[in-house]
Image (spheres, rainbow, N blue to C red):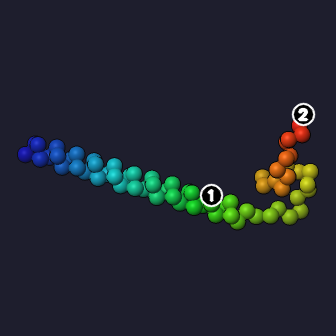
């Protein structure tokens, strides 16, 4: 009887761990899809001066000449 209770508890713990892993994987997928969507639909920043630092710079060599 005690042995059966221990086995049941271990099985429940294993099942809970599997569910947690599944939820973590789903969350990671959703975060990845969100990042991909942001990278694809990167918004333009109208009205921003070209001298102002921007999150999505159009000049990939901004710091190359900072000798």
Q: Is residue 46 left or right of residue 4?
A: right
Q: Earlier in the sequence, mark 2 or mark 1?
A: 1
Could you say where residue 32 lies in the image, as x and y percent from the top left? Answer: 57, 57
User: At 28% across and 48% down in the image, what residue appears?
Assistant: 14
Q: Secondary structure at mark 2?
A: loop
* Mark identifier at residue 8: none
Q: Are marks 2 and 1 in contact (CB under 8 Å)?
A: no
Direction from residue 7 to residue 25 in the image, left or right: right
Q: Position of residue 4 (x, y in %)?
A: 12, 47
Who's the residue at 49% across and 56% down the image? Answer: 27
Q: Nearer the viewer, mark 2 or mark 1?
A: 2
Task: Say if 56 sits above or below 62 in the image.
Answer: below
Asked which quadrant contains residue 64, the reply is top right
Name the mark on residue 35.
1
The image quarter containing residue 35 is bottom right
Distance from the alpha carbon under mark 2 to that under mark 1:
33 Å
Residue 54 visible in the snapshot: no
Indicate the position of residue 29 as horizontal and vertical percent values: 51, 58
Please name whichever residue, 43 or 13, is drawn nearer the observer in this view of the structure: 43
* Callout 1: SS: helix
What residue did someone put label 2 on?
Answer: 67
Q: Quadrant of the C terminus?
A: top right
């Amino acid at each position: 009887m005690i042995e059966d209770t221990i086995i049941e508890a271990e099985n429940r713990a294993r099942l809970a761990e599997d569910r947690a892993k599944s939820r973590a994987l789903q969350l990671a997928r959703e975060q990845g899809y969100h990042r991909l969507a942001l990278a694809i639909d990167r918004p333009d920043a109208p009205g921003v001066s070209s001298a102002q630092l921007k999150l999505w710079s159009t000049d990939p060599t901004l710091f190359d000449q900072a000798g």
